[in-house]
Image: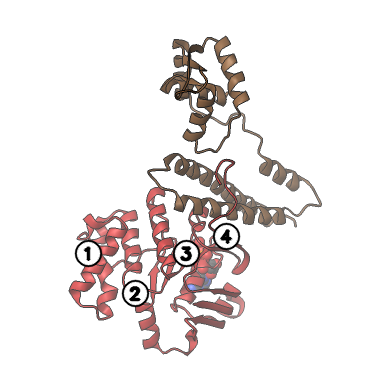
Amino acid sequence: MLAFEDVTRVHGDGERAVRALGPVAFEIRAGEFVAIMGPSGSGKSTLLSLAGALDQPSDGRVHLQGQDLATLGAAELAALRRRTIGFVFQDFNLLPGLTALENVALPLELDGTPGREAREQANEALARVQLERLTGRFPDDLSGGERQRVAIARAFVGPRRMLLADEPTGALDSVTGELVMRLMRDQCERGLTAVLVTHDPSHAAWADRVLYLRDGRLVDETCAPETGSGSPVLPLRG
Amino acid sequence: MTVKNSLLAILAQEPAHGYGLKSAFEESTAGAWPLNVGQVYTTLARLERDGLVETGPSRSSSEGERERQTWNLTVEGRSTLEGWYRKPVLDDPPARDELAIKVLLAVAADQVDVAEILQIQRAASMQRLQELTQHKRRADPEAELPWLLLLDALILKVKAELEWIELCEARLRGRRP
Ligand SMILES: Nc1ncnc2c1ncn2[C@@H]1O[C@H](COP(=O)(O)OP(=O)(O)OP(=O)(O)O)[C@@H](O)[C@H]1O
Ligand SMILES: [Mg+2]
């Protein structure tokens, strides 16, 4: 689904060049749920921007659904971002002049879904993050955590294949954070591919795989143990 | 200490015999801490000596079954139990923590690669967290409430451990190799 081939991202040049990421190489299969952890400034957001074609590598290649992103034109990239990829940004990115419902429905409408159907899907997405009663509110009239959930609903709405989420649970209490993790997990069981950047190990633990970045490099990786009839956690549970 | 108060807590629900206490304790605590019956009987003897429980009539729990000694909570037992419920639990002095001891000793030693120790531990703790999270995901929030609450507690302990490892790594970076 997503592959990074020796990808590096450098900002600026010469003396003042800053290497934000790389070189890194990894692959994420369709339907996989991967979490990215690492200290502040380690390159997590940079990695997500590259994965979502919001930024281009200085070196190396990013493949999405088998296509090298560098070979796609602006219109193809825009369609990809609108149709295939759902983003949850670190700073939510909601449009202040639109209600919660309109914010969530917008990507669908831009993609040609008729208004009524788009609103229906948007309503359903908002209900999944337990915001069914606040669909008419403007972002300024929502709490930080509610705004964050609108952004999450927007990323989930429609036939998205991949979700890229940058600290989507930062402003959420532990119960709501868990709700969002369950939602991501369930969507991945149905074929969504998700990349989650988080500082919270208990959220990363919902993923199939956890990648650790440090100074722009992948330094470690852990996979979830086999599910099902694994070793019992506690003495009396088999 | 915990066993003693746990038995009082169960007897406060209803009088029970020794084996019944064991089963009720394990059921309420999701089977996490198996009790052996011998331990239950020695604890009951001590509680009786201290006047916190007393023997009740012998009963058989079903037709034809051997009669067994039941136990009741005394008034004093009930007030001891209430005191226990109200007293906050503080880890003071802290329980011995093998990971902390190991890391501190490694930091003090000259020849030990602390970063490697932390990295190995982090991978193992994260896997454990992933495993616990899988169990949580499958737990039924109604039928398995004690199990779910226990998983939450275990998950948050491992989370704290991972955050501590991250702090250790950050503080040790820039230090001599
Ligand atoms: N436009 C830019 N110009 C120069 N340096 C940049 C630019 N964007 C990012 N960086 C640097 O690249 C590094 C990685 O940034 P990035 O935003 O990917 O970190 P992060 O892992 O997401 O951190 P955080 O957890 O704080 O969000 C940082 O050191 C950052 O200062
Ligand atoms: Mg970031």
Same subunit: marks 1 and 3:
yes
Which chain appears brown?
B
User: SS at mark 1?
Assistant: loop
Residue A99 marker: 1
The secondary element bearing badge 4 is classed as loop
Residue A196 is marked as: 3
Give the mark nearer the N terminus: 2 vs 3. 2
The amino acid sitting under disc 1 is Thr
Residue A19 visible, this orientation: no
Beta carbon of the mark 3 residue lies under 8 A of ligand 2:
no
Q: For the residues tagged 2 and 3, is the chain the same?
A: yes
Question: In x, y percent, where is residue A131?
Answer: 27, 56
Q: Most extreme residue toward the left, as rendered?
A: A116
Q: Is residue A103 above or below residue A11?
A: above
User: Which mark sits nearer the N-terminus, 4 or 3?
Assistant: 3
- Image colour assigned to chain A: red
Mark 2 lies on residue: A159
Pointers 1 and 2 in contact (C-beta within 8 Å): no
Mark 1 or mark 2: whose residue is earlier in sequence:
1
